[in-house]
Image (spheres, grey):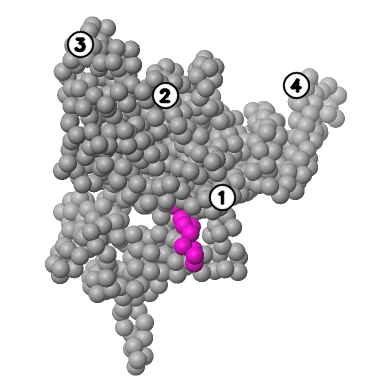
Amino acid sequence: MKFETVFDDFGTLVFSEKVMKERLPYPVYTQWKQTMSKENSLDRVTADAIAHAMKQWALENGATHFTHWFQPLTGSTAEKHDSFVEPDEFGNPLLRFSGKSLIKGEPDASSFPSGGLRATFEARGYTYWDCSSPAFIKDNILCIPSVFVSYHGESLDKKAPLLKSLEAIDKAATRLVNLLGEKDVRHVNPVVGLEQEYFLIDRDLYKKRLDLQFTGRTLFGSNPSKTQELDDHYFGSIPTRVSNFMKEVDHELWKLGIYVKAEHNEAAPAQFELAPVFTNTNVAIDQNQLVMDILKKTAEKHNFACLLHEKPFAGLNGSGKHNNWSLCTDTGQNLFSPGEKPAENIRFLVFMCAFIKAVDTYPELLRMAASNAGNDHRLGANEAPPAIISIYLGNYIEQILMNLIKTNTTKVVTDIEGNPILGLSYIPRDNTDRNRTSPMAFTGNKFEFRMLGSSLSASTVNVVLNTIMAEALDSISSELDGIKYIQDVRDKGLEICKKILTKHERILFSGDGYSSDWISEAAKRGLPNIPSYVESIDSLIDPKSIKLFTAYKIYSEKELIARNEVLNDDYCKTIEVEVRTLQQIIKRQILPLLVKEIDVITPILNLNIVPDYVTHRLNEITELLNNLSKKNNELAHDFEKVLLIDNLHERGLKIVHEIMPLMLEVRHIIDAYEKISSVDVYDIPLYGEILFGNR
């Protein structure tokens, strides 16, 4: 088939609803639709029919194998490929794909982290087709989005809890919307837009940096004379080589039905951003996993390395994955849309207050869900929000809510100049400036959660958002239950809003989240400030969290304990790799380079007159050599002691408070040498070469 434009093959690698409608018998398609809407279950005959149509479509598009594509607790994706071909009774090749193979797979459960849910010798685990996310073809493999569970049924992945949380928020939000008088709403779905930031550097330089290869970030390195000072990167011209890379990424994503919409330079040199159109949460997260995969694979084809680490370069902006979250009804209404009269829109006010309550009740969970070891280097830096959770609403919306507390009415607010607006009959979408320092900013009809790290799966943070919001909505619904008349519902709703705002207004903050004043102000308000990721992990097993997640059947207590174990283990192993890598670089590269510097200087000492510069340089290099050797030995000794601590959480805390400061001291010594190193001796790529070498 000949394509006239690049958009003609949009979605050609997706077994979409449109393809299913075209290829499936109508009764089979109807049965699948009923399964999707939870009105019916998928029987074997229907599954066989879908599998046959899916196989034929996949073969026509060049697929040779199929896989259950799932998201284990590593945070990435996993797949085991099975060929469509198998021998018949006569030994002849037969192409077969049954409904059973579509619905269920059996990967090795002992190969993935489980936090003790699976012992090494207990290998059995199962993947089950998630029919709410479309199958697709990647690298000639038919990929079937799936959940991953243990032999005993515990969740071993990121997707199963997400699907449960989607059911919880659907049920809770629909219940409240119905109580507010909109009886025609049958379902409410969270929709998400995930902006993806990343760095793109020359692959040849990447291969010369062991720290980038092994850890994803530079463990040493000083900034060049020019970095972000002139602010000429954000909307500047995209380098031709990078533009060619972006075009291929776009095309690959479009073929997978991903509506990638915007792309541009980011604040730091060699940093870029890609933003898709909003879609249902489950699909959005699957698509983001594909985005990360395609960014990395396409980068290799263009001799680039794509860095998804949250802070690849110290002193420069880090990378995030902004999670834009909202709620939409099956009738097409956005529940966070203020409408023309937000002050009189009881549904909007109630849902806004529910969100405020949810976030202020569980800030520790949100801090945990948005973080990993890499994000600790980013939170609080120039482009990232601080580790303190707060909400920015904008002047108009915040005035409406605050006025409700003070006067028990939402009628009188002021415009930007401070003039009163009676009734607030109209509100422009961009009624206030955008606060980029806020971790949770209301941006017209959605909340932008900016803390999420760029390399992370967005599953956990959306599980938390969905579940805490479901609890807040159910709490409001319980107070509205039994009220017959809509005016009484409205009056009671305003009363509930006032009560919520009075208790939770501390979470609202419109100022500069980067300022030191905010840290002291947040402390006065009683807002938690959790400086490191590892200190937030235990929020998963806090009694409050256990009660929340078990009540909504998102996680069992056993699953929460297991995930706590996995996260602590992941943190410790991440830093262990960093320490080992740093030590290897110091011993095999940096110390020998310092010795070489001395070897270059030594012959000059035999001259009758030795310049003062030479003597000074020799002393300086010798001092750096001695200091680095001593500090590296101290790091090695202290880290070996830390590794003897059996309790992973305690080990992680020791790493944060003792090992990370030591690593920073070591870095400072290397950076000091790098700044004065001879260009004839120092052969490790510098920041300047790496950041400006992609053009």
**Left or right: where does residue 92 sit relative to residue 646?**
left
Residue under numbered circle 2 = 504
Q: What residue type is labelled 3?
A: Ile
- Image coords of residue 693 (percent x, y): 47, 38
Q: Which of marks 1 and 3 is nearer the N terminus?
A: 3
Which residue occupies 52% across, 50% down? 557
675 or 372, nearer to the observer: 372
Residue under numbered circle 4 = 613
Which residue occupies 50% across, 19% down? 525
**Residue 210 at least partly seen:** no
Q: Earlier in the sequence, mark 3 or mark 2?
A: 3
Q: Which amino acid does label 1 sit on?
A: Ile
The C terminus lies in quadrant: top left
Determine contact: label 1, label 2, CB under 8 Å: no
Q: In whole angstroms, how far apart are the C-alphas of marks 1 and 3?
A: 52 Å
**Left or right: where does residue 30 sit relative to residue 531?**
left
Determine contact: label 1, label 3, CB under 8 Å: no
Residue under numbered circle 1 = 561
Residue under numbered circle 3 = 421
The N terminus lies in quadrant: bottom left
Q: Which amino acid does label 2 sit on?
A: His
Q: In whole angstroms, how far apart are the C-alphas of marks 4 and 1?
A: 61 Å
- Image coords of residue 365 (percent x, y): 49, 38
**Mark 3 or mark 2, which is nearer to you?**
2
233 or 473, nearer to the observer: 473
